[in-house]
């Protein structure tokens, strides 16, 4: 039973660390950019877009398709950075423990 008690304590500590890590991620702002910085977006640690900045040079109605593509590319860039950061933080919390495929956090 000592091993079980130790395992439960470890699990409780890991859960606390994971909750702390999720709070840290939620407070983060991750910026992504496209078009040499002409379009930037900021996502929360949960992946929600908080802001978008578009260079006024891109506001020409004839360039709207390019503008839309750049917005999508900037969102993808920020999301990729966010996923990498979350994986780094998770590795710190789990001490390199490989979690089952369905246990990706924070989502």
Image: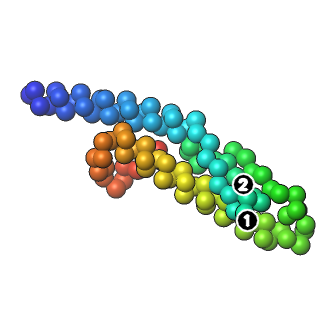
Instruction: Please say which color scheme the image uses.
Output: rainbow
Q: Is residue 33 above or below residue 85?
A: below
Q: In the rendered image, is residue 90 in sight?
A: yes
In the image, is 98 to the left or to the right of 80? left
Residue 35: image tag: 1
In the image, is 57 to the left or to the right of 102? right
The x, y position of residue 20, in whole percent, is: 44, 31
Instruction: Give whichever of discs 2 and 1 has the lower sequence position.
Output: 1
Report the residue at 47% width, 37% height from top.
22
Report if the CB atoms under discs 2 and 1 are less than 8 Å apart: no
Nearest the viewer among 48 and 34 is 34
In terms of secondary structure, where does tag 2 sit?
strand
In terms of secondary structure, where does tag 1 sit?
loop
Report the residue at 43% width, 47% height from top.
88
Report the residue at 65% width, 55% height from top.
32
The x, y position of residue 31, in whole percent, is: 65, 50
Q: CA distance from mark 2 to mark 1?
A: 9 Å
Report the residue at 49% width, 48% height from top.
85
Residue 40: image tag: 2
The x, y position of residue 93, in whole percent, is: 36, 39
In the image, is 46 to the left or to the right of 56? left
Category of crowding for the residue at label 2, using alpha-carbon neighbours closer than 10 angstroms: few (below 14), some (14–19), many (at least 20):
many
């Amino acid at each position: 039973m000592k091993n079980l008690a130790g395992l439960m304590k470890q699990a409780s500590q890991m859960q606390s660390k994971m909750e702390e890590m999720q709070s840290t991620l939620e407070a983060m702002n991750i910026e992504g950019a496209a078009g040499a910085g002409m379009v930037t977006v900021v996502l929360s640690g949960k992946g929600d877009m908080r802001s978008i900045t578009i260079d006024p040079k891109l506001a020409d109605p004839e360039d709207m398709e390019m503008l839309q593509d750049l917005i999508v590319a900037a969102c993808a860039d920020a999301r990729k950075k966010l996923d990498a950061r979350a994986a780094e933080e998770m590795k710190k919390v789990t001490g390199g423990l490989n979690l089952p495929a369905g246990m990706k956090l924070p989502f």
